[in-house]
Image: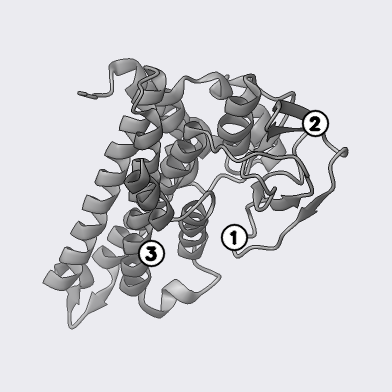
């Protein structure tokens, strides 16, 4: 399956980057309203992957990811406002459940749409404080994770890893050691190159997953597992090298790096780590 972005998709990516850059100074509510106004929630899978990658690049804090890739594929429609879904059979670590207007619950008897407030929801403190994660007390949930939800997390992780690499490249170009930029040392170049290769591999598999979803291809579920696994493996390498190349600066709360490291790690942990999805591929 050959995949190349066409002119409209390239234009969409540029538009998203510009719109996000201009709206970053505004509050999350204003950003969320802008995304809805621009119709991004209605984007088909390939275009949605491009949008999510750009939102991952800036560690977006709006309910976009949950509404577009958790609620929509389970409910079969977009939420009225923000939405999320319970599809793990347990209601554990549900993205944006504490601020969703609607929660779609996958049960053995079908899908049930529950308005906010009708299910007990308890927000959980996690290492990425900009993410809203909660437990939902639901008794009849059935397991069945949508492929779109896995693809969405993979695309978001790719965006976060891209930002980490860009920060690293800027840093090693400017930071001097022994009278030379850090980036001039071969070991540093190798680590940056490894990060780039891992990101491009995860991005290619994410695009493949999005394309199978767009074409209703029978390989969609397997492709989503591959994308989620590749994104998880990517973030582990990018996390390790990115933190190391920044030295002690990478451990500080004052630096932007920690925001993207946390978001990339959270994308790996939500809905199963890379190991979980590799096992799923082996059992198919």
| Secondary structure under the numbered disc 1 in the rendered image | loop
- Position in image of residue 148 (x %, y %): 49, 32
Residue in the picture at 47% in, 33% down: 147
For disc 1, the marked residue is 128
Image disc number at residue 114:
2
Q: Is residue 222 left or right of residue 184?
A: right
Q: Measure how far apart labels 2 and 1 are at the Cα level.
A: 27 Å
- Position in image of residue 31 (x %, y %): 64, 35
Residue in the picture at 46% in, 61% down: 261
| Secondary structure under the numbered disc 2 in the rendered image | strand
Residue in the picture at 44% in, 24% down: 45
The one nearer the camera, 126 or 112, is: 112
Mark 2, Cα crowd under 10 Å, few <14 / some 14-19 / many 20+, is some
Residue found at the far left of this picture: 186
Q: Measure how far apart labels 3 and 2 are at the Cα level.
A: 37 Å
- Position in image of residue 264 (x %, y %): 46, 55
Q: Is residue 43 left or right of residue 74?
A: left
Mark 3, Cα crowd under 10 Å, few <14 / some 14-19 / many 20+, is many
**Whether label 3 touches label 2, CB < 8 Å:** no
Which circle's residue, 2 or 1, is located before the other in the chain?
Answer: 2
């Amino acid at each position: 399956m050959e995949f190349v972005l066409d002119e409209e998709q390239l234009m969409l990516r540029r538009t998203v980057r510009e719109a996000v850059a201009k709206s970053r100074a505004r509050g999350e509510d204003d950003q969320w309203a802008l995304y809805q106004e621009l119709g991004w929630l209605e984007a088909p899978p390939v275009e949605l992957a491009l949008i999510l990658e750009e939102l991952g690049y800036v560690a977006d804090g709006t309910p976009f990811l949950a509404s577009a890739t958790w609620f929509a594929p389970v409910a079969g429609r977009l939420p009225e406002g923000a939405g999320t879904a319970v599809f793990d059979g347990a209601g554990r670590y549900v993205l944006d459940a504490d601020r969703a207007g609607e929660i779609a619950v996958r049960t053995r008897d079908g899908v049930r749409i529950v308005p906010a407030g009708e299910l007990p929801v308890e927000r959980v403190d996690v290492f990425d404080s900009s993410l809203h994660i909660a437990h939902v007390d639901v008794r009849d949930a059935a397991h069945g994770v949508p492929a779109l939800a896995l693809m969405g997390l993979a695309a978001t992780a790719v965006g976060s890893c891209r930002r980490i690499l860009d920060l690293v490249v800027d840093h090693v170009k400017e930071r001097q050691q022994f009278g030379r930029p850090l980036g001039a040392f071969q070991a540093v170049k190798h680590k940056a190159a490894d990060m780039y290769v891992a990101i491009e591999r995860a991005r290619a598999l994410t695009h493949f997953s999005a394309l199978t979803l767009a074409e209703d291809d029978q390989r969609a579920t397997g492709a989503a597992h591959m994308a989620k696994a590749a994104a998880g493996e990517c973030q582990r390498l990018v996390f390790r090298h990115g933190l190391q190349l920044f030295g002690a600066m990478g451990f500080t709360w004052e630096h932007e790096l920690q925001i993207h490291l946390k978001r990339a790690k959270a994308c790996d942990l939500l809905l199963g780590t890379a190991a979980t999805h590799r096992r799923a591929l082996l059992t198919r």
